[in-house]
């Protein structure tokens, strides 16, 4: 049997050659035996030519659809010339939708087609069966397929491409299912006769349906499917089929494109017995080629190479909680983001309407992943780091470990509840008002009684300010009546409006019952007396000291990431005063719809999220939590407040956890946030990021701390061993190592230091290719990926926190190609 053309994946993972057993988790590495044809570049070129014809046809159709969208916009402007008000509204809607559609088509231009499935004749396959979803008739007139618009089996083009480039009857030419069937039949006969006499024993099999898979669905003018959206059920076999369970797929082909040009194909033969004569199987190692590409500053989408176990998690049911676990580099983040794109496709109304919130550990990480969803055509998603969930805060600073532990503990919710009901510092303990020559006076005891009455029944302080003022006025009126007699006192309403306008009353209310901001109340906890009182029975003396010490600096330093969850808790406890009725500021907005807009506004609107939400929106339809192992109990409460009606995707790896508080408490907080929703768990087991050599170093570190830990398997060997430099003179060694890494890799270099040393280390490498080199601290490195990684003083990372070993494990597992460590000792090894 001839070897397979350019089967890089097989070659790299299994140095003994393609006959060696494939890794158990790589369904693409198996079933590569060609049924016919020679393994030479000529055959690959022929297959590329076959696919190029279909790709050309797809782009030609795309151009037409784009023109239609542009025409739609022009038509909109013509409507406007009719001059009526209704026509203007119609114009706005048409232009808006046309601009949105054009933007989507532009976003999905590159690599639009990336896969092809050759099915057994008559094989319904799960896609075919599910393809009945196409019966919902959601095909748009524009020719793009929309959510749920899955082409039925009969809609997909059928091909019979043969090894001969000259064969004119390929998928590209088959314009109707009837044509295609003919093509298929002709090819089989052709193939048997012409395929270099290399037909297999199963060569008698006939060709079946062909499906092309791409970033969006496209139909031809006659409604035949040119490309199926990767999220449609009919595309699922592309990710799910295996030789053991081929799901009706005979051959799966990955098509690599640069722009509109097909540059490579890679096949898996999944069902050799069903392969028609002449079917050729070639390979370029698309997965490994993808993994070996230089890393840019942003994460890439993996839509063309999603693996089976990942696909199962991506397409997990929309409701309930999907939990995705797995070691470093197993694609948890990639899976979570593709799942969001899938959910938006599967039920756009629900998820785009309600909104999707993605929470990541840091702004550095959020920047890194920000591009993935737009690259999948989805940008209606809110991305937030843990420090920026609360509107108006952008915290990036982390508290030292012992502080973070106290602030993250669930006990803080009770401490803060006490604070939120306490007297404002400096609040007056007496009110004096002169009324018709008589001094009215409320003393401390009376005021305290009023406060308790107003706050009874769990009232939120900021929401009952008016009620508090009313109670004070009532008490003053009763006193006036008592002292002066009813006849000498105005009726209650007049009395109240008279007193309420007095400067002394206004001043008193401002001081006694001010509108409190969460940050004000958090600041109160810098006072040891108060914090001792609030923490009575909840916090130890040492914890009170830790907390007050940290909060004493909040004004100077700004809130830390850990403070943000406390601020959100306080916001909830204090409540928001009822907003005054909104004045309509824009005369063109009627019932929330702006009816007359400028061209620039319409285009801008087409770029903005489709649904306007208030700044502090809390009713997301889906919430994704990445790096969930690091979410503290108080942070779970903060996220949970935004997910009362949401389904969830929770992604994490306990072995990478930096949170080392009470595990039972963390579980309780998480369970409370997730509620009783049904949970489905997926475990990912292949590390796609690190070379085996790099992961060995990281795994060694964590295994020493946790010998029984289950670790993923790295997917490729690079032949380059990590470098460990031991020196007492760190600065020059770090700079030199960073320079070396920049020279060795084409993509990014991450320099990872302790939290304490990050700024200093950043100074050491200042000026070195800032476009490619980034210095981060060990916590910021969570979720990140670089081609080259330089870990500075690994022992110090271990020593910096009780979970230091795990943090070092994270740092050491960030590199795709090169890892260097520089340290003054190597006790960490
Ligand atoms: N199926 C795949 N095809 C191609 N690349 C993949 C695939 N799955 C994952 N990757 C790549 O592997 C790398 C790691 O993925 P990702 O960051 O999602 O992993 P992770 O499990 O979240 O890692 P960590 O827990 O270490 O942060 C990324 O570069 C991603 O693009």
Image (cartoon, helix red, strand yellow):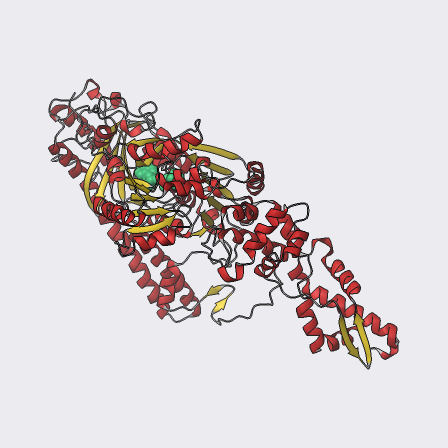
Relative to 591, say whether 388 is above or below. above
Whole-percent x, y for residue 409 in the image = 57, 45
Relative to 818, say whether 424 is above or below. below
Whole-percent x, y for residue 716 in the image = 27, 32
Q: Quarter of the image holding residue 785? A: top left
Q: Quarter of the image holding residue 572? A: bottom right
Residue 96: in sight, yes or no?
yes
Whole-percent x, y for residue 549 in the image = 56, 54
Tell whether 7 sits left or right of 625: left
Q: Nearer the viewer, residue 268 or 18?
A: 18
Q: How many marks?
A: 0
Could you tell me which quadrant the C terminus lies in?
top left
Relative to 366, say whether 690 is above or below. above
Residue drawn at x 50%, y 44% is: 631
Could you tell me which quadrant the N terminus lies in?
top left
Q: Quadrant of ligand 1?
A: top left
Q: Nearer the viewer, residue 483 or 79?
A: 483
Residue 618: in sight, yes or no?
no
Q: Nearer the viewer, residue 94 or 663?
A: 663
Whole-percent x, y for residue 133 in the image = 40, 38
Q: Quarter of the image holding residue 18? A: top left
Residue drawn at x 19%, y 27% is: 279
Tell whether 325 sits left or right of 445: left
Q: Quick one: which residue is furthest to the front in this view? A: 728
Tell whether 329 sits left or right of 415: left
Tell whether 526 sits left or right of 8: right
Q: Quick one: which residue is furthest to the bottom in this view? A: 437
């Amino acid at each position: 049997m001839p070897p397979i053309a350019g089967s890089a994946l097989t070659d790299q993972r299994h140095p003994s050659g393609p006959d060696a057993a494939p890794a158990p988790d790589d369904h693409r590495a198996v079933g590569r035996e060609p049924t016919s044809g020679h393994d030479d570049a000529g055959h690959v070129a022929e297959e590329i030519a076959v696919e190029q014809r279909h790709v050309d046809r797809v782009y030609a159709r795309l151009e037409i659809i784009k023109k239609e969208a542009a025409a739609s916009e022009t038509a909109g402007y013509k409507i406007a010339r009719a001059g009526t008000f209704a026509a203007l509204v119609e114009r706005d809607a048409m232009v808006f939708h046309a601009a949105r559609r054009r933007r989507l088509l532009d976003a999905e231009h590159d690599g639009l087609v990336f896969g092809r499935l050759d099915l057994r004749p008559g094989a319904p396959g799960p896609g075919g069966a599910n393809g009945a979803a196409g019966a919902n008739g959601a095909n748009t007139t524009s020719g793009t397929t929309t959510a749920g618009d899955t082409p039925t089996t009969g809609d997909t083009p059928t091909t019979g491409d043969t090894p001969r480039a000259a064969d004119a009857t390929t998928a590209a030419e088959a314009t109707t299912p009837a044509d295609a069937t003919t093509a298929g039949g002709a090819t089989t006969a052709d193939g048997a006769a012409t395929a270099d006499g290399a037909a297999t024993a199963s060569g008698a099999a006939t060709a079946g349906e062909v499906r092309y898979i791409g970033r969006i669905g496209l139909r031809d003018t006659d409604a035949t499917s040119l490309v199926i959206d990767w999220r449609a059920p009919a595309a699922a076999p592309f990710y799910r089929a295996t030789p053991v369970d081929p799901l009706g797929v005979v051959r799966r082909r990955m098509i690599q494109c640069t722009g509109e040009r097909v540059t490579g194909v890679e096949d898996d033969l999944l069902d050799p017995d069903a392969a028609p004569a002449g079917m050729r199987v070639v390979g370029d190692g698309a997965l490994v080629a993808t993994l070996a590409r230089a890393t840019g500053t942003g994460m890439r989408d993996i839509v063309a190479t999603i693996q089976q176990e990942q696909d199962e998690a991506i397409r997990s049911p929309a409701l309930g909680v999907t939990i995705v676990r797995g070691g470093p580099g197993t694609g948890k983040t990639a899976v979570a983001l593709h799942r969001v794109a899938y959910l938006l496709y599967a039920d756009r109304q629900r998820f785009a309407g309600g909104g999707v919130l993605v929470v990541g550990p840091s702004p550095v990480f959020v920047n890194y992943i920000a591009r993935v969803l737009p690259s999948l055509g989805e940008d209606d998603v809110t991305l937030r780091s843990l420090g920026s969930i609360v509107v108006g805060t952008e915290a990036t600073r982390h508290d030292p470990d012992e502080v973070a532990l106290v602030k993250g503990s669930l006990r803080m919710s009770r401490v803060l509840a006490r604070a939120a009901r306490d007297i404002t510092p400096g609040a007056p303990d007496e009110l004096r008002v002169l009324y018709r020559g008589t001094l009215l006076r409320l003393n401390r005891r009376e005021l305290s009684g009023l406060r308790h009455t107003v706050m009874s029944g769990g009232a939120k302080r900021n929401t009952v300010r008016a009620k508090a003022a009313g109670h004070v006025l009532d008490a003053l009126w009763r006193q006036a009546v008592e002292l002066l007699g009813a006849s000498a006192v105005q009726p209650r309403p007049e009395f109240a409006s008279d007193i309420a306008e007095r400067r002394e009353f206004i001043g008193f209310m401002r001081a006694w019952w001010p509108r409190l901001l969460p940050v004000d109340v958090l600041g109160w906890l810098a006072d040891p007396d108060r914090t001792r009182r609030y923490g009575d029975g909840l916090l130890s003396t040492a914890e009170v000291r830790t907390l007050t010490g940290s909060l004493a600096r909040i004004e100077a330093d700004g809130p830390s990431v850990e403070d943000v969850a406390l601020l959100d808790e306080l916001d909830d406890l204090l409540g928001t005063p009822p907003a005054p009725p909104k004045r309509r500021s824009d005369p063109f907005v009627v019932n929330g719809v702006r009816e007359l807009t400028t061209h620039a506004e319409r285009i801008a609107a087409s770029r903005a999220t489709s649904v306007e939400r208030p700044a502090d929106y809390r009713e997301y339809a889906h919430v994704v939590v990445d790096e969930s192992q690091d979410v503290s109990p108080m942070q779970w409460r903060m996220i949970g407040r935004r997910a009362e009606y949401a389904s969830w995707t929770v992604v994490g790896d306990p072995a990478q956890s930096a949170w080392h508080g009470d595990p039972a408490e963390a579980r309780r907080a998480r369970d409370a946030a997730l509620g009783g929703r049904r949970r489905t768990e997926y475990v990912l087991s292949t590390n796609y990021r690190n070379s085996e050599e790099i992961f060995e170093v990281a795994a060694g570190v964590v295994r020493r701390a946790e010998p029984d830990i289950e670790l993923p398997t790295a997917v490729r060997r690079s032949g380059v061993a990590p470098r460990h430099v031991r020196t007492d003179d760190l600065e020059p060694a770090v700079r030199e190592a960073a320079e070396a890494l920049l020279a060795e890799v084409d993509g990014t270099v991450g320099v990872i230091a302790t939290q304490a040393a990050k700024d200093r280390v950043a100074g050491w490498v200042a000026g070195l290719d800032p476009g490619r080199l980034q210095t981060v601290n060990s916590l910021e490195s969570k979720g990140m990926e670089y081609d080259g990684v330089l870990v500075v003083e690994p022992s110090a990372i271990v020593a910096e926190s009780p979970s230091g070993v795990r943090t070092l494990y994270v740092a050491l597992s960030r590199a795709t190609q090169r890892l260097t460590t520089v340290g003054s000792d190597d006790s960490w090894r």
